[in-house]
Amino acid sequence: MNLPAIQPIQIAVVGAGYFGSFHCGKIASIDGVQLAAVVDVDRDRARRMADEFGAEALNSHRELSGRVKAAVVAVPTSAHHEVAAELLSFGIELLVEKPLAITLADAEDLCRLADGNMLRLQVGHLERFNPVFLEASRRIHKPSYIRMERCGPFPGRGGDVGIVLESMTHDLDILLQLTDAPAVDVTASGWSVITSHLDVVTAQIRFADGLVADLMASRVSLERARRFLVLDEKGVLDVDLAGGWIRRNSLDGSREGSDKLRLDGGDPLLDQDRSFVEILSNGKQPRVGGAAGKAAVALATRILECIG
């Protein structure tokens, strides 16, 4: 008896810019998936990317209605809510690049739409799939202080939002994985250097469990850094997310194992996109769902309100 062939999951990528182009390659490489469409307001860019992966080129996300099961939303941050809300109204399940939205009200609206339509909503907080963070999180015990730094030169793209939403939300999401306590006090300062938005921001967040976190994000630095340091009950854990290493100094000055535990950085974007595909098949909820995306936006909003 011939069994019917299993049809691949039809997925679109909306936004064929810098990050969208990477998503196209990852989605197209996953077994059981067909990159069905590439959508971009720039017709030529959509066509070039679609041709590379054998997909259909579309000019508007509205053309996806009835065509695909799911989509990756990689449009500029300021357009996340408009695009994602319409796609959810079409019954399309989503992976939305971080941040989920630029306002808390918009993030809450997307969560309501997803829940109301019984659709999965995943948010692209990529560090959750970084093997360095995954290993570090297993080694952290009752943190009392965290210092986080995320810096780099201006990339020449983006800039439709400030550094808090563009970049610091990665660290806010990490921070929220390391404590269950609510934030009770937030102070922050920020500066515009190149764009009309904040390009450099420092913030301090105090949590109800006593945890204090200092964060710094900049897109006008000379060198790149994605690093955080944790003081916990076992000592100090130094984590370099970009360099791919972890180092523990215990309270008595000794070290755990070698000077630095070096880790394979893997392919977090592929792992994230593959995780999205898996939940489309198995009916489970995403590792980084809408609630997590909303929580990061809520904390980012408090930081921005402090700066004014």
Image (cartoon, rainbow, N blue to C red):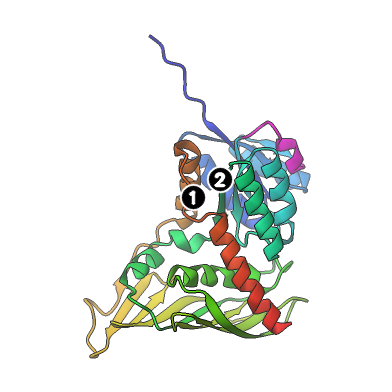
Q: Using the rendered image of the protein, determine whether residue 191 is visible from the camera's viewpoint.
A: no
Distance between the Cα atoms at labels 2 and 1? 7 Å
Quadrant of image for the C terminus = bottom right
**Up-down relation of residue 82 to residue 61 (above or below):** below
Q: Is residue 228 left or right of residue 47?
A: left
- Residue placed at 77% from the left, 48% from the top? 42
- Please give the label number shown on residue 215: none
Residue 161 point in image, percent of width and height: 71, 69
Q: In which image quadrant can residue 132 be found?
A: bottom left
Q: Within the image, what quadrant is residue 129 found in?
A: bottom left
Q: Amino acid at mark 1?
A: Pro
Dot 2: few (<14), some (14–19), or many (≥20) neighbours within 10 Å? many
Q: Main secondary structure of the magenta part?
A: loop
* Residue 36 in the image, given as x and y percentages of width and height: 62, 35
- Front in this rendered view, residue 177 or 155: 177
Q: Give, as a single range, the part of the protein colored magenta.
A: 59-68
The answer to the question of whether label 2 and label 1 lie on touching residues, with beta carbons closer than 8 A, is yes
Q: Quadrant of the N terminus?
A: top left
Which SS class for mark 2? loop
Name which residue lies at 76% across and 40% down.
62
Residue 269, can we see it?
yes
- Point out the residue furthest to the bottom here: 252
Q: Nearer the viewer, residue 181 or 205?
A: 181
| Residue 113 inside the magenta-drawn segment | no
Residue 144 picture quarter: bottom left
Residue found at x 39% / y 76%:
239
> Residue flagged by tag 2: what amino acid is it?
Arg
Give the residue at the far top of this rendering: 1
Horizontal placement of 297 versus 255: left or right? right
Q: Which residue is mark 1?
A: 286
Res 120 label: 2
